[in-house]
Amino acid sequence: MPHTPARWWQHSVVYQVYPRSFCDSNGDGIGDIPGIASKLGHLQALGVDVVWLSPVYASPDDDNGYDISDYRAIAPQFGTMADFDALLAALHARGMRLVMDLVVNHTSDEHAWFQQARQSRDNPFHAFYIWAEPVDGGPPTNWASIFGGSAWEWNAATGEYFLHSFSRRQPDLNWEQPAVRQEVHAVMRFWLDKGVDGFRMDVINLVSKTWGPDGRLPNAPVTRPGFLQNGFSLTANGPRLLEFLREMRQVVLRHHDCITVGECPGITPDLARAITDADTGALDMVFQFDHMDLDSQPGQSKWQLKPLDLRDLKRSLSTWQQALADTGWNSLYFGNHDQPRVVSRFGDDGPWREASAKMLATCLHGLRGTPYVYQGDELGMTNYPFDHIGQCRDIETLNMVRDAMAQRGGDPTAVAADLMAAVRAKGRDNARTPMQWTAGPQAGFSSGTPWLAVHPNHTTINAEAALADAGSVFHHHRQLIALRRSEPALVHGRYALLWPDHATVFGYTRTLGAVQLLVVCNFSAQPVDLPLDTLDLAGAAVLSANWPLPLGLDALCHGGALHLRPYEALLLRLATG
Ligand code: TEU
Ligand code: CA
């Protein structure tokens, strides 16, 4: 039982909008704020409580808005501040809340602070960024940028390198400087004073770096000799992280009724618990990444593919469910703008697309935490069939392919088949293709030419068709979202994993007092007979199902086993007493 009264975000569902790809109102091929405002009926029909907007701030778009040049301005291609204010008011009028993306580990290199900082070592803004002298005529450490190459870039005007954990156009801010933190607090206040309801904080666990005793950033431990090292070991989870976040809570957040979620690659359950501790922590929840790494070769980049072993997924999610059971709170997600489409990744985007998309939604929404729905996942949108690199726009993908081809030598435009296979499986553009509204031209996304191609399957997978079909992936999501309001056990119930070693079934219970929910998901196209052991399904109520049950649950139970059809998912309330 919860010790403290539930906070509103504990029984909310968040919907992520990627503005570039949601809805284009003026035919320039880029989604925009008036486009979002025109689609609030869709969000309300789905029943979500909160909308998280990926960045809409002024940006040169080196990383689609995650490189911000002015934290208090709206990018012209997305609209005006008046458009933003109107969107916020319209959301509030419909009883929904708005969460902004806060990208403050780094700025754009076009931000006025960096423009100043790079001019001279005496400039007052110089200390806003992280600088270091060359070592042996080269970069100061062996750190790799997440987007390829060294994490250090030369700045001729000052004769130093600056640190960029992401692209060279995204210099990292130096949070050791109190003035940097004060500026960030002021930006947060600016948006909270406008009435926004919280922040999704981009790579917020990277803001405290692990400095050496000499006051310099040290080399990362060498795990792959001869290669640059993934900087996360020394850029993430640094010694002052909790202090910086608590300061933010103390100075800004505690004065507002808001929701905060920190994006935290490489975070541990212990640190996440400390950060989300309602009494002594700082944020409401974090996005952890463990379950996003399970289909890559261990210790390798995300592009080194490995089939998912469901037992790994169960182990990983269960670890997090248990770690934050008594203190802290989980966020629940299978997809976002950085990940491939979940139905293509963990389900089947062929013959079992609808069943598996619904199964994955059941599996996620049944867990304890706040669920996040990424735009298009409520339609079961799929990965894009990229067959040449010219179809891609994402800097991470383009850099990876460029670097890999350079290493192999030969014609850099003739991208090797294995690289394209990795792009098809993992490229971020998979999630960024335009939202599929209708079967019509450009899926109803734009009257012009979209910045990234529309998926050809929009003729069958689109919102118009999904809303009209009571058995669609959309309506399955809608029912799951509604259940969160009517079933307290879904919000607060204690989690327990069942059948941990089963290779294709993910099953668990959620228990609150005398109420016990059972979630059973078949992650395979093969039917399966699941031994029920001591579980008794007699008299259970079916709260959610993705296959028809004309003869009721009993028809699925034979000889002490539950018969599950391909990708079948059930959410049951067991009879008590
Ligand atoms: O992502 C942080 C992050 O860790 C990702 O770079 C992730 O490792 C990668 O996308 C997996 O392919 C955030 C944003 O969500 C992402 O869109 C930005 O590119 C990045 O920060 C830099 O701001
Ligand atoms: Ca537009």
Image (cartoon, rainbow, N blue to C red):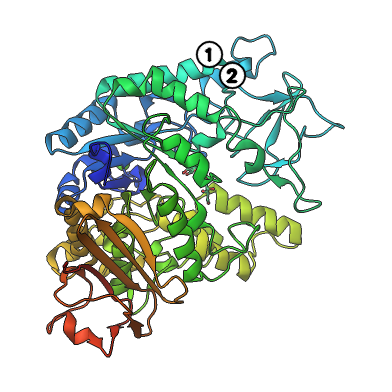
Please give the name of the residue rendered at 14% of the width and 81% of the height, measured from the top-left corner: 552
Return the x and y of residue 112 as percentages of the image width and height: 52, 19
Please give the name of the residue rendered at 75% of the width and 44% of the height, measured from the top-left corner: 221
> How busy is the neighbourhood of tag 1: few (under 14 within 10 Å), some, or many (20 plus)?
some
Return the x and y of residue 302 as percentages of the image width and height: 58, 58
Secondary-structure class at tag 1: helix
> How busy is the neighbourhood of tag 2: few (under 14 within 10 Å), some, or many (20 plus)?
many
Q: Is residue 457 visible?
A: yes
Q: Which residue is mark 2?
A: 128
- Mark sitting earlier along the chain (1/2): 2
Q: Nearer the viewer, residue 314 or 538?
A: 538
As drawn, the label of residue 479 is none
- Answer left or right for 243 relative to 525: right
* Vertical arrangement, residue 487 with respect to residue 130, above or below: below
Asked whether the beta carbons under mark 1 and mark 2 sit within 8 Å of each other, the answer is yes
- Answer left or right for 537 relative to 287: left
Q: Is residue 438 visible?
A: no
Return the x and y of residue 427 as percentages of the image width and height: 51, 58
Return the x and y of residue 370 as percentages of the image width and height: 31, 47
**Between tags 1 and 2, which lies in front?**
1
Q: Quadrant of the C terminus?
A: bottom left
| The residue carrying mark 1 has its beta carbon less than 8 Å from ligand 1 | no
Which of the 4 image quarters holds residue 97?
top left
As drawn, the label of residue 179 is 1
Q: Nearer the viewer, residue 3 or 54?
A: 3
